[in-house]
Amino acid sequence: MKAVVAPLAGALGFVLLWQLAVWLQVADPVLLPAPLETFRDTWRAFTTGTLGFDLWRTVQRTALSFVIATLIGVPLGVALGAKERIYRAVEFVVDFFRSTPASALFPLFLILFGPGEGTKVAVAAFGAALVILFNAAYGVMNARRTRVLAARIMGAGQGRILFDVLVWEALPQILVGMRGGVSLALVIVVVAEMFIGSTDGLGHIVINAQMLFESGLMYGVIFVAGALGYALNLLFLVMEKRFVHWAGK
């Protein structure tokens, strides 16, 4: 109950603070509508508009980007982590692009993939893959040496050590990278939906509502995107506790 009550109390406090700001007229009511009005506009968009479909399109793009990023980032990160000298040679490139805002790479991906669906997925997968690769590599490099030495003493070969020791040792860090990767993929997808010729998705609705001064809908969709990100993060936290319960032991 404590785990449920605390987040609900925080959410309720935020809504009350928002309503207080409306009562005090901190901003123009057109720019800062009341929470009830925001909820009403968002619910109407779900029931009579396209918000449900747009949410699904954003989930689809995020899921596809994340799957591509995982299929690239995990094996490559494990392989580079197992050969630390090779990783150190490419570490600058990985860290450079990992630190570069994804929105700055939009022109490059538009040239490579054109102004279509592929650009949104590719740029999100690229950003997420770097986060996953980084965590996978460091998870392998930081594996406990005592377990590696014990496996060698017992006659395990390099391949056996990699798959039976290093990968399992790195799995908690890999899941941390995947959790960060899926969150980043969602952020990039929503931003891409705003600025790369999209006709659907949460980002598309946000930018359209902003231009039409539909502030209630705009805030509502922002909260929907935030709730989606929170749910994805919570899902991976549950997975970490369920499947890597040995972490730190």
Image (cartoon, grey):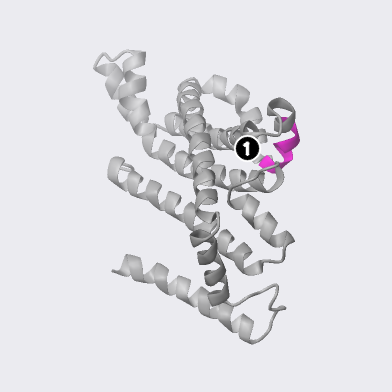
Residue 73 pos. (x, y %): 50, 29
Residue 127 in sight: yes
- For residue 97, side relative to residue 59 (left or right): right
Front residue of 186/141: it is 186
The C terminus - image quarter: top left
Is residue 219 found inside the magenta-colored segment of the image? no
What residue would you read off at disc 1? Answer: 120
The structure residue drawn at horizontal position 72% and vertical position 62%, both measured from the top left corner, is: 212
Residue 206 pos. (x, y %): 64, 57
The structure residue drawn at horizontal position 68% and vertical position 48%, both measured from the top left corner, is: 194
Is residue 107 found inside the magenta-colored segment of the image? yes
The N terminus - image quarter: bottom left
Front residue of 107/151: it is 107
Image quadrant of residue 18? bottom right
Vertical placement of residue 223 versus 5, above or below? above
**Amino acid type, residue under disc 1 in the picture:** Lys
Residue furthest to the bottom: 24
Residue 50 pos. (x, y %): 55, 54
Magenta stretch, main secondary structure class: helix
Residue 8 pos. (x, y %): 40, 70
Crowd tier of the residue under label 1, counting other residues whose Cα lies within 10 Å: few below 14, some 14–19, many 20 or above: many
Vertical placement of residue 201 versus 218, above or below? above
Instruction: Find the magenta span and give its range.
Output: 102-108
Q: How many marks?
A: 1
Front residue of 118/139: it is 118
